[in-house]
Image (cartoon, grey):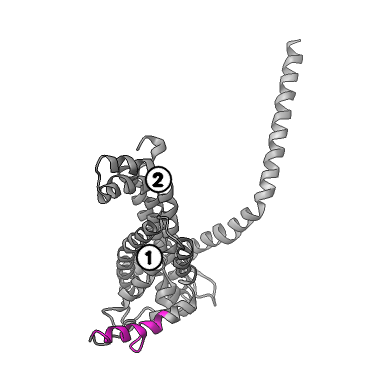
Amino acid sequence: MPEQADVAKYNSKSDKLHKQWKVDLIGFAFIAPWLIGFLGFIIGPMIASLYFSFTNYDLLSSPTWIGLDNYINMFTNDSRFWQAIKVTFIFVFGSVPLKLAFALFVAMLFNTKRRGVGLYRTLYYVPSILGGSVAIAVVWKQLFGRDGAINDILSLFGIPSVSWVTSPDFALSTLIILVVWQFGSPMLIFLAGLKAIPAELYEAAAVDGASPLHQFIKITIPMLSPVIFFNLVMQTIQGFMAFTQSFLITEGGPMDRTLFYAVYLYEKAFAHFDMGYASALAWILLLICGIFTAFIFRTAKSWVYYESEGGK
């Protein structure tokens, strides 16, 4: 009898495992297209890129293993690499805070019950849809050219014209302004976060005599900190990967003053056909993005407020 009970228990367990495997198989079948794309278009190229970063590869001949030479040359003999690092860091630290601050400011304006506010939200989101396109880059280049509309407006106030995109002193600032102008996406996320803040908190603070500035500092910022955290991570990563603005408007010039890291990587890969070196550059970029993302996550415990976790 004990043996029959063991057999029945084994059969029951086997049936459960069979049913569970059948359910898992159906799940894998549904996500198979994504898995194939993930392995074929992301993991596969990443592994190939890691291998090429240790080789001398020009697309026309077989890759030659050279060990760490690409990385050593990058850090010791490549002045343009350090220029690209410098420009990209200035761009990220200049554009991300300005973009987030401006997006939050506009979101707070839209978080009011005014007539036609829905139309304005759509209009303000349009630059984010078109901002990375070739057409907008060309328009931006014309606007900030020596004969562009910006100089025409400044001339009304007696300010001499400046070639914003070809001047070493103003080219990078012009690109930062363009990126800040593309605030639509973080603005919408901020707006969703603002609408989730309970109105009772503001009502109670107003009864206690708190000023609008005090309410902003003590209620809005803490309650919105998870959204700020998300936008900060996403915009930082996008900032390090910025490419279109520099490539289309200034082509990395003048004098490499707008040489974004991604543009330099592109030059090495598709202008000089140095795929091995470009692959090494790509892995350094991935490492930089990973370090900054990890740092933001590490500091999140001290400034991000999660109401569901009791403020921790």
Q: Which is the main secondary structure of the residues drawn in magenta?
A: helix
Which residue is rendered at x = 74% and y = 29% of the image? 15
Look at the image and give the residue range highlighted in magenta. Answer: 140-157
Q: Is residue 65 visible?
A: no
Q: Residues within 10 Å of mark 1 (few under 14, many from 20)?
A: some
| Mark 2 or 1, closer to the camera | 2
Which quadrant does the C terminus fall into?
top left
- Quick check: marks 2 and 1 in contact, CB under 8 Å? no
Asked whether 13 or 195 is in front, the reply is 195
- The residue nearer to you, when weighing 29 against 173, is 173
Asked whether the viewer can see residue 179, the reply is yes
Q: Find residue 74 and report its horizontal and vertical position in percent.
A: 35, 69
**Residue 52 shown in magenta:** no
Q: Position of residue 218 (x, y in %)?
A: 28, 45
At x 39%, y 38%, the residue is 307
SS for tag 2? loop
Residue at mark 2 to residue at mark 1: CA–CA distance: 48 Å
| 181 and 44: which is toward the camera | 181
9 left or right of 219 in image: right
Examine the rendered structure and indicate whether residue 245 appears above or below residue 240. Answer: below
Q: Residues within 10 Å of mark 2 (few under 14, many from 20)?
A: some
Question: What residue appears at the point 35 percent right and 55 percent down from the top-left corner?
Answer: 292
Kindly give the residue lying farthest to the top in the view shown.
1
Residue at image position (70%, 25%) is 13
Classify residue 20 as left or right of residue 146: right
Q: Amino acid at mark 2?
A: Ile
Between 136 and 279, the one nearer to me in the picture? 136
Q: Which residue is mark 1?
A: 71
Answer with mark 2 or mark 1, whichever residue precedes in sequence: 1
Q: Give how far across and how far down residue 228 sits, in percent.
A: 37, 52
Q: Which residue is mark 2?
A: 197
In what element is the residue under mark 1? Answer: helix
